[in-house]
Amino acid sequence: MADEVILLDFWTSPFGKRVMIALREKGVEFDTREEDLSNKSPLLLKMNPVHKQIPVLIHNGKPICESLVIVQYIDETWGPESPLLPSDPYERARARFWADYVDKKIYWAARSAWVLTGEAQEAANKEFIESLKVLEGELGDKAYFGGERFGYVDVSLIPFSTCFHALETLGNYSIVEECPKVVAWVKQCMQRESVAKSLPDQHKLYDHFVARKKEHQAQ
Amino acid sequence: MADEVILLDFWTSPFGKRVMIALREKGVEFDTREEDLSNKSPLLLKMNPVHKQIPVLIHNGKPICESLVIVQYIDETWGPESPLLPSDPYERARARFWADYVDKKIYWAARSAWVLTGEAQEAANKEFIESLKVLEGELGDKAYFGGERFGYVDVSLIPFSTCFHALETLGNYSIVEECPKVVAWVKQCMQRESVAKSLPDQHKLYDHFVARKKEHQAQ
């Protein structure tokens, strides 16, 4: 019997996109169920009763939650011939460190830059660029974060690139000027079918964010 | 040549204690270097230039940072006969999910309950107990979170038990009344040499926290 693989997702979520990209890198067939986050489905509430959040991967009826946990599960379950994490324990630890850095720094700074206003927003813009520059330094002249192979850190970070346009428009700065190597890496990642097929259009995302922000301010 | 294993730590840190416990579970000899967090050593700044935080494990000169990353590194590097993470990918994902839950919920609620005041503190107290009750439900009647074996989730959570006395004293509630299974699990874990030898005395920790809070309020 073939595996039944279902992804509970919302189209703007960079976390959901990590899971999509990892599944496509491994050549796993899956169904996506788009959630209405203002009216979450009984399936989502049943499958992730603790956090009640997307993404959730449901593999033959069993749920896996939290995007980095899911990506590691995918890596350990399918396609050992195309691993996302390196085999060496030290290199694995480094990859996990940088994926964790994306969650702790890039996500929060990007979110704050979008949600906050005034001086707090300025500070968040600055923190976002500083955090991205740290990744620029880590990337250096490598093709991907792990070297020659597209891997775990790339999967973790690349979904956030669709917010770059919104963030630089909002903050009135240029990411390509600040972090040219990261921008070249984004272009290289976008050549991969797994990435190009999974990420939303950055302009559509920008329009969505602007509309949400207006709604939020009107309340 | 024998491995050189150095842990940069601070005695109150539950994150540093995770690393100690994991090393002791694996029977790894190590040296601990106590950091002065108000005047961090050049070694710490060199070994963790990104976050500048303890704990850092230095294995034959190479640094590994972030406690859960370090515990997984230890598990993959030493003592395959006494694994901390289960071998089944789904069970591994579950263990990673709950360790992440400890970081996201237990740590933040405990910290907020200690740092905040007034209504915000009340809310944090409530959140801490609610989060611990979720773990009580997950533990159920098992000996350890993973079943019969002391493992990754136990290592991740047990260091926070030394704050229970401080938190219930501050919040005027009883953890054993709210979460009797968790408290029984703490007692069982404390029977292990790896745990008993690593955790600080809860009363000494309480006195330290009270003194720090007074200093903070006086500023």
Image (cartoon, coloured by chain):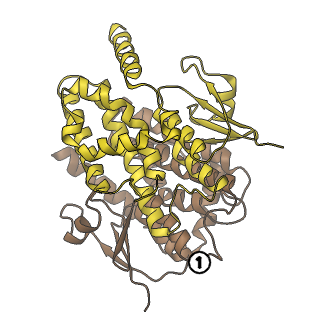
Chain colours: A brown, B yellow
Residue A36 in sight from this viewpoint: no
Residue B20, how many percent across, how many down? 56, 38
Against A24, residue B178 (above or below) is above
Q: Residue at x 18, y 26 (%)?
A: B172
Q: Could you say which is closer to the camera, residue A94 or residue B182? A: B182
Left or right relative to A35: residue A62: right
Task: Residue type at mark 1: give it.
Answer: Gly
Q: Considering the image in quadrants, where does the N terminus of chain B appear?
A: top right
Q: Residue at x 64, y 50 (%)?
A: A180
Against A72, residue B19 (above or below) is above
As drawn, the residue found furthest toward the right would be B1
> Within 10 angstroms of label 1, few (less than 14), some, or many (20 or more) residues?
some
Left or right relative to A200: residue B68: right
Q: Secondary structure at mark 1?
A: loop
Q: Which subunit holds the residue at mark 1?
A: A
Residue A44, how many percent across, how many down? 26, 67
Q: Please give the residue where the numbered disc 1 appears in the rendered image.
A: A79
Left or right relative to B146: residue A92: right
Against A197, residue B129 (above or below) is above
Residue B76, how many percent across, how many down? 63, 56
Residue B206 occupies which quadrant of the picture? Answer: top left
Q: Residue at x 19, y 41 (%)?
A: B178
Q: Considering the image in quadrants, where does the C terminus of chain B appear?
A: top left
Q: Could you say which is closer to the camera, residue A164 or residue B195? A: B195
As drawn, the residue found furthest toward the top would be B218
Residue B108 occupies which quadrant of the picture? Answer: top left
